[in-house]
């Protein structure tokens, strides 16, 4: 089921909201540091009374002498005084067309066009639509491939819809991990963003508002040194910090999952190490209502992935220190989002193999399982893992990294999204 179909069904239960900012509100939003990622509106209770949350929010914002439309997610409303409520809106993403009137003009059904015309808000106004009109409007917007990334972003924020394994979400989490390991805040604005025209990329979910002069839509994103798979690259973002540069690529149908059994590859050229992650979803154990645990039950897919996680033979000298040279790790993520975050833990491949062979890992019915309770705190937290990557304490040695990069370059095909994060010295990259 496509993102558009899922969202159209959602808004039939929780109809879409229209907001039109006046000049003063538009200017304040543009001048805010994080407004395009998270802002709030305070209005009398009656304005928000009929709104059912969370749901889509379609905004028209003034930009100079023109307007621009954005799709966002209204996530919650809270009473802040005797008379007023606060509406929280997250992740504004640009849409086409650029005005509510232009969107109205795309509607061919006369009844739907009339209904939207009656509900268009004035400057500074907020209205909500009927269920059928909301679904029809989603279909109209989805017909333009340029709006795909905005729809993907909305989908990632809707509960129950976002609980399924979702390529854009997995890419977003991998991107955030790469940025954190590089020492960049998740709301940092990239120096450059390239998004493949019409493609879905986790880069559309990250960071602060990406202004139009900072984003380039291209028919092909070139991946230097990876020409054989450049057609699968969906986006590229460049971050700079002092004398280092982080380049993040998103791609589809790469061979790395098929070859190495991984979802994320972090290549730290500064320290010369490679670390690879495979994502797995934890399911809530509902059998014990008094003590809810989160479980992963190993299956044949896991065993196949582990079988592919092998370093090539290396006969050269290894002079740099590693706490562990095995680059393979597993990230186990709670499928249910708690407080707008996916909670997770990480274990190394060596630790996972030990767990799978231990009798303690067996559940009441004899099946092997991983869980918070079974591990009893013996795992890596996100911050632990990121610190080890940044310091170069884990992952392949420098000489092995060079060999692995060559192997990755030769890969030809596959069917799972992967993020490549290259960290390199800017002066070295210019040579």
Image (cartoon, rainbow, N blue to C red):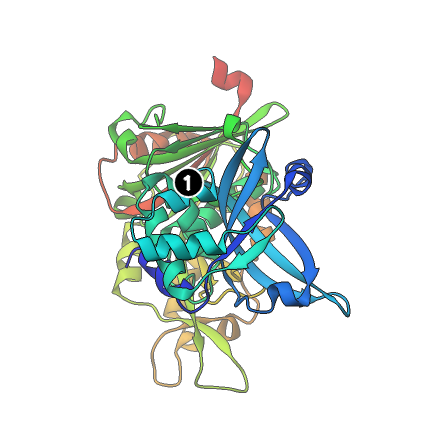
Q: Residue at x 22, y 35 (%)?
A: 412
Up-down: is 37 above or below 319?
below
How far across and how far down the image is residue 377, in percent? 57, 67
Q: Secondary structure at mark 1?
A: helix
Question: Is any part of residue 380 visible from this angle?
Answer: no
Q: Which of the 4 image quadrants contains residue 252? A: top left
Question: Is any part of residue 66 visible from this angle?
Answer: yes
Residue count near mark 1 (Cα–Cα under 10 Å), binned few <14, some 14–19, many ≥20? few
How far across and how far down the image is residue 210, in percent? 53, 35
Question: Which one is in front, 98 or 154?
Answer: 98
Find the residue positioned furthest to the left: 413
How far across and how far down the image is residue 409, in percent? 30, 30
Residue that badge 1 annotates: 102
For this view, does 390 lie left or right of residue 196?
A: right
For this view, does 272 lie left or right of residue 180?
A: left
Question: Which one is in front, 6 or 324?
Answer: 6
Find the residue positioned furthest to the right: 82
Q: Residue at x 39, y 85 (%)?
A: 364
Q: How many marks?
A: 1
Question: Which one is in front, 102 or 91?
Answer: 102
Up-down: is 330 above or below 394?
below
How far across and how far down the image is residue 237, in percent? 47, 32
Q: Residue at x 58, y 48 (%)?
A: 122
Up-down: is 409 above or below 355?
above
Find the residue positioned furthest to the top: 431
Q: Residue at x 40, y 50 (%)?
A: 152
Which quadrant, please, contains the N terminus? bottom left
For this view, does 78 lie left or right of residue 420?
A: right
């Amino acid at each position: 089921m496509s993102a558009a179909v899922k969202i159209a069904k959602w808004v039939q239960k929780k109809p879409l909201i229209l907001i039109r900012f006046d000049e003063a509100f538009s200017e304040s939003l543009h001048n805010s540091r994080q407004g395009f990622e998270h802002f709030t509106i305070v209005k009398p209770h009656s304005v928000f009374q009929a709104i059912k949350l969370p749901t889509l929010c379609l905004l028209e914002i003034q930009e100079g002498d023109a307007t621009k439309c954005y799709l966002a997610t209204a996530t919650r409303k809270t009473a802040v005084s005797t008379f007023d409520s606060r509406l929280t809106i997250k992740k504004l993403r640009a849409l086409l067309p650029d005005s509510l009137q232009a969107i109205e003009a795309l509607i061919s059904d006369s009844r739907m066009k009339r209904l939207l015309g009656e509900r268009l808000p004035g400057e500074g106004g907020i209205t909500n639509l009927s269920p059928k009109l909301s679904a029809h409007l989603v279909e109209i917007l989805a017909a333009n491939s340029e709006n795909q990334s905005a729809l993907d972003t909305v989908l990632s924020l809707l509960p129950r819809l976002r609980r399924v394994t979702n390529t854009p979400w997995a890419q977003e989490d991998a991107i955030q991990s790469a940025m954190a390991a590089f020492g960049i805040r998740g709301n940092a604005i990239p120096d450059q963003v390239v998004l493949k025209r019409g493609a879905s990329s986790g880069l559309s979910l990250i960071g602060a508002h990406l202004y139009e002069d900072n984003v380039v839509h291209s028919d092909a994103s070139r991946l230097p040194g990876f020409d054989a798979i450049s057609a699968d690259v969906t986006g590229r973002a460049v971050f700079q910090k002092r004398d280092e540069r982080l380049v993040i690529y998103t791609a589809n149908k790469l061979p790395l999952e098929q070859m190495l059994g991984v979802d994320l590859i972090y290549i730290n050229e500064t320290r010369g190490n490679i670390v690879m992650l495979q994502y797995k979803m934890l399911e809530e154990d509902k059998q014990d209502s008094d003590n809810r645990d989160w479980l992963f039950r190993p299956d044949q897919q896991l065993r196949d992935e582990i079988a592919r996680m092998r370093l090539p033979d290396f006969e050269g000298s290894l002079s740099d220190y590693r706490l562990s040279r095995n680059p393979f790790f597993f990230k186990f993520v709670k499928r249910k989002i708690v407080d707008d975050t996916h909670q997770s833990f990480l274990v190394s491949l060596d630790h996972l193999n030990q767990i799978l062979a231990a009798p303690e890992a067996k559940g009441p019915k004899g099946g092997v399982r991983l869980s918070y309770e079974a591990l009893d705190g013996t795992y890596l937290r996100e911050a632990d893992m990121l610190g080890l990557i940044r310091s170069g304490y884990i992952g392949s040695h420098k000489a092995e990294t060079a060999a692995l990069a060559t192997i990755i370059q030769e890969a030809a095909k596959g069917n799972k999204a992967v993020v490549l994060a290259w960290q390199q010295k800017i002066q070295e990259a210019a040579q």
